[in-house]
Image (tube, rainbow, N blue to C red):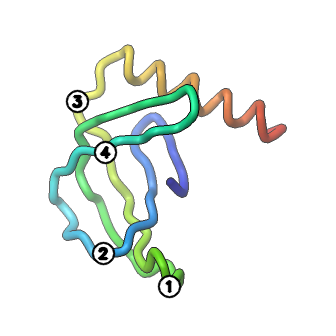
Amino acid sequence: MVDLSIEGMSIAVDFDPPAGRSCDIRVLHTGFSLQVQSKIIRAKPSGDAQFPYQVAVAFENLNSVTRDMIGQFILSRQRDSGG
């Protein structure tokens, strides 16, 4: 995971996915697990040999509980990093 917001995320992958495609995203992190329906917004070259594409996805059909979980995770990460 490169970046996470309540609306979506940016991830680094080793393939070039087509924009507009629906996908299920699963995030597993210590103390945090998430699986949501998403749509690929765009993919662009990342310059990284292992994960050559950076992909932006938008979350779809989030319920309020999942949205709150994402928000709490983001705030927790910001506190941990001093930001």
Q: CA distance from mark 4 to mark 3?
A: 13 Å
**How far across and how far down the image is residue 55, in percent?**
38, 64
**How far across and how far down the image is residue 14, in percent?**
37, 74
Q: Earlier in the sequence, mark 4 or mark 3?
A: 4
With respect to residue 37, does 62 lie above or below? above
- Tag 1 near tag 4, CB within 8 Å: no
Q: Disc 3 designates what residue?
A: 61
Q: Amino acid at mark 1?
A: Ala
Instruction: Locate residue 14 relative to residue 79 in the image: left or right.
Output: left
Disc 4 vs disc 3: which is toward the camera? 4
Using a 10 Å C-alpha cutoff, classify the residue at mark 3 as few (fewer than 14 neighbours), some (14 to 19) or many (20 or more): few
Q: Earlier in the sequence, mark 2 or mark 3?
A: 2
Instruction: Locate residue 70 relative to residue 78 in the image: left or right.
Output: left
Q: CA distance from mark 4 to mark 2?
A: 15 Å
Q: What SS does tag 2 mark?
A: loop
Q: Residue furthest left?
A: 21
**How far across and how far down the image is residue 43, in percent?**
34, 71
Q: CA distance from mark 2 to mark 3?
A: 25 Å
Q: Disc 2 designates what residue?
A: 15
Q: What SS does tag 3 mark?
A: loop
Q: Which residue shows up at 79% across the image and 41% down it? A: 81
Q: Amino acid at mark 4?
A: Ile
Q: Disc 1 designates what residue?
A: 49
Using a 10 Å C-alpha cutoff, classify the residue at mark 4 as few (fewer than 14 neighbours), some (14 to 19) or many (20 or more): some
2 vs 58, nearest the viewer: 2
Q: Disc 4 designates what residue?
A: 25
Q: Which residue shows up at 50% across the image and 53% down it? A: 1
- Tag 1 near tag 2, CB within 8 Å: no
Query: Can you tell which quarter of the image residue 26 is in?
Result: top left
Q: CA distance from mark 3 to mark 1?
A: 33 Å
